[in-house]
Image (cartoon, rainbow, N blue to C red):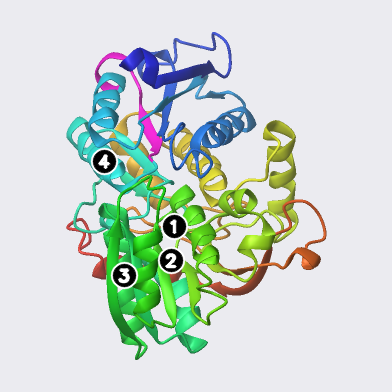
Amino acid sequence: MMRSAIAVAVLIAGTGSASAAEISDGKVKIGILNDQSGVYADFGGKWSFEAAKMAAEDFGGKVLGAPIEVITADHQNKPDIASNIARQWYDREQVDSIMELTTSSVALAVQGISKEKKKIDLVTGAATAELTGKQCSPYGFHWAYDTHALAVGTGGALVSQGGDNWYFLTADYAFGYSLEEQTSKFVKSKGGKVLGSVRHPLSNTDYSSFLLQAQSSGAEVIGLANAGLDTSNAIKQAAEFGIVAGGQRLAALLFTLAEVHGLGLESAQGLTLTESFYWNRDDKSREFGRRFFERTGRMPNMIHAGTYSGVLQYLKAIEKAGTDATEPVAKAMHEMPVDDFFANGARVGANGRLISDVYLMEVKKPDESKEPWDYYKVLATVPGAEAYLDPAESGCELVK
């Protein structure tokens, strides 16, 4: 199983200086563990691996004189497979840190193993706020987004526009539950109502019965508490049922540039969503976006950009700490500001949460798009302190 799961490994800087006493095993080894063959393959997938390699190369290919190695594997959205890979990486393959970790159930499982092994994990692909809440770790970091930020962004926008009554179509696992719960709380806090919800299996193909229940609820907003192809397929089938044409609105609670591209502007136009990165937002994001495009043939979403940012920050922390030992590197990660094209003047909370701005987006109409991948209008910037829970209120035992 391991042979088929591991996709590829890349040594960024050749032999390097393996004599650096401060670096264990003579190299720094980062594992990108995510879904590369299933419903989230475009959401993160091999593109996150490319982003991680870009960060290592841009850092110079070495840290403290030792080469940087980046490897990757497909966890197939299964916590047991992910856990087996993580243990093999830590116990037998000298992996120093595991990152990306699409799928909340997988991220929670691997963070638990990382805590046990005293290894750093950095999550960019999973959403559940529990990673920096009750299941936080002194060695765990959460980049890019979480369920609370998505609820504040997309949920808040639609309630303010009159979408008071909600019904949820929810993926039947930890991520979906958390996203529904967070958004429901926010909707209710603004005076809205939740009329009900229905849960569907991950990687579902037929949403007919679920959409009919949502349609018959009479809710003004149908919240899609899912992601990747699940969201795309639900949107396509909702159009077949005439849900939007009938006056109800769809809220894509986790939808990124990759899924908009796959769906096309004709189908996705008008959707409101939240991302923490957009390649066409400013000069720095455009510069990264175009370099990423030259390498991959696509523009990055917040998962890809967040993975680059997280890998780069981890390498900077090793440099600051003067070692790749977990405790001093984790300390440096908490102390250092994050200031790059992804997160401007951001900081890491005591619970491991990167507190950076997020952006409320609306998908453009086809005639509004000026060039390929020009898909969003930025409606609002939500400051990080509003988007994310105060660490003191997160439930993380590490926060004093």
Q: Toward which corner of the image does residue 3 lie, by quadrant?
A: top left
Residue bearing the label numbered 2: 150
C-alpha distance separating marks 4 and 1: 17 Å
Q: Earlier in the sequence, mark 3 or mark 1?
A: 1
Residue bearing the label numbered 3: 182
Residue bearing the label numbered 4: 111
In the rendering, at what x and y percent does residue 328 appear? 33, 37
Magenta segment range?
90-101
Q: Earlier in the sequence, mark 3 or mark 2?
A: 2
Marks 4 & 1, CB-CB < 8 Å contact: no
Residue type, numbered disc 4: Gln
Q: Nearer the viewer, residue 52 or 400?
A: 52
Identify the secondary structure beneath mark 3. Answer: helix
Q: Is residue 33 visible?
A: yes
Q: Residue at x 43, y 46 (%)?
A: 125
Q: Residues within 10 Å of mark 1 (few under 14, many from 20)?
A: many
